[in-house]
Image (cartoon, rainbow, N blue to C red):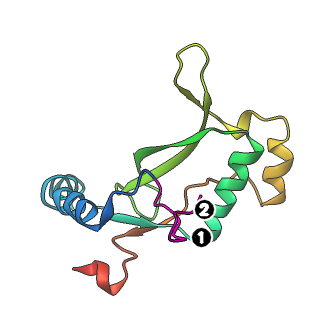
């Protein structure tokens, strides 16, 4: 829906540059040092995803008839490249009639999962982003 001046209104969840920067700084000053100390190296400050990644995720949400997305915080394991570092895990949700909330959807429970996963060389995750550090742009380094 366009406004009278022809501009499209911002989405209701837009928080703006000031609030975004305040929250990033608060994390950098409070939680990031604690997490980094615990794993004895700089922990993840951000994770970058490609537009293609997000597009595919939205397509999967449509296929699964998802109503939303829950993002969990996780940590990479000992055998992973980014051992101990923070990661994000995106899980589709559906309405939960019993609680009035939302339940996680596992596409691994879908009947065609095995066939679909073999087409891509085996089961894979939606959550392959580029963690910073170590994969930071120059602007993000400081």
- Residue at the extreme bottom: 138
Whether pointer 2 and pointer 1 mark residues with C-beta atoms closer than 8 Å, the reply is: yes
Residue, x 71% and y 50% (percent of image)?
A: 60
Give the CA separation, mark 2 to mark 1.
5 Å
* Secondary structure category for the residue under label 2: helix
| Most foreground residue, 124 or 17 | 17
Compared to residue 23, the image places residue 113 above or below, namely above
Residue, x 24% and y 59% (percent of image)?
A: 19
Is 48 on the left or on the right of 58, as rendered?
Answer: left
Q: Which residue is mark 2?
A: 54
Q: Position of residue 97 (x, y in %)?
A: 61, 17
Image quadrant of residue 92?
A: top right
Q: Position of residue 9 (x, y in %)?
A: 48, 61
Residue, x 38% and y 58% (percent of image)?
A: 83
* Secondary structure category for the residue under label 1: helix
| Most foreground residue, 119 or 19 | 19
Q: Which residue is mark 1?
A: 51
Res 82 label: none
Q: How many marks?
A: 2
The quarter of the image holding the C terminus is bottom left
Q: Position of residue 56 (x, y in %)?
A: 69, 60
Q: Which residues are magenta?
A: 1-11
């Amino acid at each position: 829906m366009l406004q009278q001046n022809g501009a499209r209104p911002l989405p209701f969840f837009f928080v703006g540059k000031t609030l975004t920067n305040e929250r990033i700084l608060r994390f950098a000053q409070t939680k990031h040092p604690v997490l980094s100390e615990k794993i004895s190296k700089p922990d993840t400050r951000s994770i970058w995803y490609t537009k293609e990644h997000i597009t595919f995720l939205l397509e999967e949400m449509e296929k699964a008839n998802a109503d939303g997305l829950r993002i969990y915080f996780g940590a990479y394991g000992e055998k992973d490249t980014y051992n101990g570092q923070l990661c994000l895990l995106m899980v589709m949700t559906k309405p939960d009639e019993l609680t009035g909330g939302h339940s996680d959807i596992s596409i691994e429970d879908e009947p065609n999962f095995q066939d679909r996963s073999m087409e891509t060389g085996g089961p894979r995750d939606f959550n392959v982003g580029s963690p910073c550090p170590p994969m930071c742009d120059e602007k993000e380094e400081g």
